[in-house]
Amino acid sequence: HISFEKKKNDDQEPIIRSIEHSSIMPPQEKCPTTTTTNNKNTIVTSNSDFTSAVVGKNTASTGTPSASSVHVVVTKDVPPEHQEKWLDMAHELATATWKEPGCISYDFVRSKEGEKANTRFVIVEEWESQAHLDAHFATPHFQTLVPLMDEISTTVNLDVSHKALTVLRNTDSLDRTKRNGRILVLFDTSTGSTEHIANLIAEGALLLDRMDVRVRVVPGPPTSWEDPKIQRDANHPFATYDDVYWADAVAAGTPTNLGCISYRMKQFWDDFSQAGGWGTTDGKIGTAFTSQGGHGGGGELACMAMQSVLMNFGFSCFGITDYVGFLDTMHYGSAIAKKPRNEQDKMKCRRQGLRLAEFVAYYINGRDECHPLQTKEWEAKKWGHPGIPPRSADTQELTERTTCPHVSLNESPVSVNNKKKALVFTKMEDYVHDSTPAMAAWTLLKLQEFGWEGVVTDDSDYIESADKLSKFDLVVFLNNSGQIFDKTESLLAHIEQGKGVVGVHAAVAAFLNGKDASGATIME
């Protein structure tokens, strides 16, 4: 999937949407931003071939807009010399389209194989109804950008369709280790300060791969000091209860009002409870953040009050031990005086988002490599326990720690799994024992009883490769026979390091120069 990631100017704030690592841009350049304005009431006619083709195809096939969701798949060829310009416009188009009512998905993907891999792009869309798709065609960003994109690309194929299956896939039943983590950043704001924190927390969560992030504002009437003409959902949609059900974790942010949470945030959870939400969200993960009028303005009280609400709904809330500077931490959540302007405040928010993503990845998705100690260990080694940066720590280096991809995405992540590992080797080139599968299963069970991890294989490369064998503390030769491997250097090095070797039953029948396995047969 292509992530549209552009360098952010200092005067722009990011509007966050779920981002996956891109085959176009490296994850190190992850700074999503938006620049478009949403003028929903402006209708502009278009001469775009794309619009004519889609509208014409739907009118011919259905006559009237369908009430079911509409899928659009557009295949484009973009010459290499135009791709940078085309992707810049695609970024702007996608960012504006994601805010439109009825947009379920709007993604740009790139072919990975075949002779057209360097030029072939596919736009994959899903809309709630044909009416929403028609409204999309009339938006200013579509009318302006699509003709310009068409001028420097070629439309290979365009298809509009509806779902063919009446049964929908239940993604909640997917193996949790195979799906993305889901994070909801939920906030209320009166002056925009809490929204800025929410954007940074979402940005931090996306430093870890395989995370889907939704940023939502709680609904409700304006306060007495707010301008009622301001569109509160201009940058992010209003939250729904489905957003809460969807999420594995919620980062809930509120302005500090009299040392407590805002009334709109409180009302959202009150109404959610009355709508049947209480008792249905147990096992989710929660964290809190707030903006306050000034330092010491009650922000930590507001964070703890927010966490109290989450815990009443069964959320597991966690503390944050990180220091992003010598005097900067967020044990109970980011509590920022007004808008996060200096780099220390921004680092707090990003680190909280990253921590939340790590908890989701480790505890929900079962990804051992994303344990929170991964990033903590780097800091502890550099600055000493408990990893608090010294006064002399370089600001640029501290900043990079909160903007770079997660350490699990590096080539050699630090392992936090201290279990010993055993290789159960079952290769049989001569006589085959039918009991071997049962013996291998029993061996794994016994290893687990003693806190070991076991790997069963008959691949000789695990014995001959120094890199593969070095990962194991014990080799169990189980019922082997014949010439089971050729190179012995790695196994000898394994023994010289004091690591274990166990031979079970017919393991002694390997490497015999006779035709049977009697005790009188001499081994080579």
Image: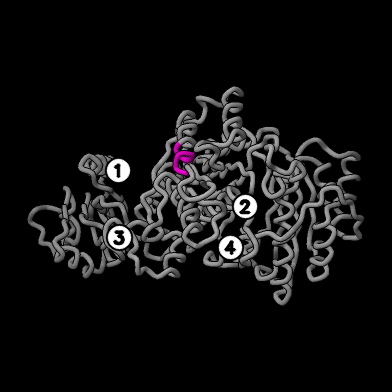
Give the x, y percent position of residue 467: 30, 66
| Sooner in the amino-acid sequence: mark 4 or mark 2 | 2
Q: Secondary structure at mark 3?
A: helix
Q: Is residue 300 magenta?
A: yes
Task: Decide which of tag 2 and tag 1 comes sooner along the chain.
Answer: 2
Identify the secondary structure beneath mark 1: helix
Q: Position of residue 142 (x, y in %)?
A: 81, 57
Q: Is residue 392 above or below residue 332?
A: below
Q: How is the image coloured?
A: one colour
The label on residue 380 is 3
Q: Which callout, 1 or 4, points at the residue further toward the start of the chain?
A: 4
The residue beneath circle 1 is: 437
User: 62 above or below 386?
Assistant: above
Toward the left, the furthest residue is 520
- Label whose residue precedes the other's in the sequence (3 or 1): 3
Dot 3 amino acid type: Ala
The kind of residue on which mark 1 rests is: Pro
Residue that mark 4 sits on: 31
